[in-house]
Image (cartoon, helix red, strand yellow):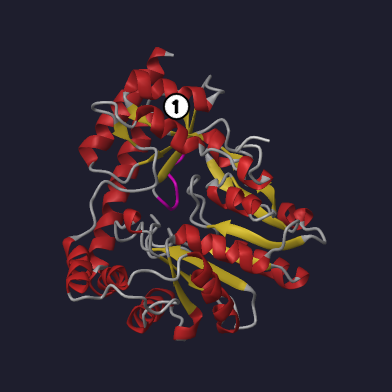
Amino acid sequence: MNQFDSLSRRAIHSPESGIVAVANHGRLKPGLIPLWAGEGDEPTPGFISQAAAAAMMAGETFYTWQRGIPELRQALADYHARHFGRRLPLDAFCVTGSGMQAIKIAIEAVTDPGDEVIQITPAWPNFAAALEMSGGVPVATTLDYADGRWSIDPDRIAAAVTPKTRALFINSPSNPTGWTATREDLVAILDLARKHGFWIIADEIYARFVYAGGRAPSFLDIMDDTDRIIFVNTFSKNWSMTGWRVGWIVAPPSIIQVLENSVQYQTSGVAQFMQKGALAALEQGEGHVEAQIAKATAARDLFCDALTSTNRVVTQKPDGAFYAFFRIDGVTDTRAAAIDIVDRANVGLAPGTAFGAGGSSFLRACFLRRLDHVEEAAGRLAGYISSL
């Protein structure tokens, strides 16, 4: 048996990211406008980086609190009180090495190999892949799609529940669709979770990116202390910190020690100087978040209007997040199309094939970029579409 064949089946069958595959094809192309990744184009604000650098220079480079330094957990509690109207204890928070690690920890906390987790799709692909690598089974329930709008059917979710269902994963506002659950949607899902006794893993990282104003509805608005809900979140999007890999979990205090144990055996905690940068983000970063939302609003309108004006694109302006998820008339193989668009239009998009059931005929563009780049990218795509 060779080296490859002696690896575990789960490792061998872990899928290559369809998004990364396109990015690797065009990453070094001169002049390319990259709209494939879920991040903006601004570097981390200086006050965040300076706080981290100052902590590093002050010698804060030792092992630290695995669930997060107390002052950062206090700042997280204050942030949730401000924006979600719910005062949570410090023991409800656990700082993680990225939102992705938060998801992985949540999966391993509530599932055993062979257990099923319902996922609302089209969806960011990393959750299903991480679940499969942990031995779990993703069960897709697709959003309804009509006239460019996405909506949820609670009865479809109910029909997916089996004796093996241990959790439901929901991302709202959604990457890639921009679908944003209403309060009524969340009530219906929570009622199902209570009825069947499964956990909810709630990814609300785009909760501030809502174009009707305010923030998205949250399970924090409707839950009680006995509900089985784990929230996964990240500093990446709001504060332009994607490369930092710092996230957090909100969970019932009764299980936080279990989650902290997972941190211990995966990374042994987030570097203290990085946590000081995250602390600065929470304490000083509200203006940056508001500026990012305003930027995304203008870019959304510009980009979506340009695409729909071709009369060859089916989409609506998303309610939340910062992605356009659109279908081009006559394009069926979106992975091949994404490669072709890189080669011919010099624009990087993510293929809908990466986002699971219901998404294969779409393309995703992240429009959180400076407006002249968004305008140029939209113009290049319009020219490409007209040539088909």
Percent position of residue 8, x then y: 66, 46
The residue at 33%/32% (across/down) is 27
Tell me where residue 232 appears, x and y as whole percent: 50, 65
Q: Is residue 31 above or below residue 214?
A: above
Quadrant location of the N terminus? Answer: top right
- 156 or 39: nearer the viewer: 39
- According to the picture, the residue beneath numbered tag 1 turns out to be 338
Per the rendered image, the range of residues in magenta is 315-321
Please state which of residues 256 and 336 is positioned toward the viewer in this rendering. Answer: 256
The residue located at (38%, 69%) in the rendering is 270
Is the residue marked by circle 1 packed among few (<14), some (14-19), or many (20+) residues within 10 Å?
many
Instruction: Work out which quarter of the rendered image holds the C terminus and state it.
Output: top left
Q: Is residue 208 magenta?
A: no
Q: Image height check: is 216 above or below 296? A: below
Percent x, y of residue 115: 74, 59
Say which amino acid is labelled 1.
Ala
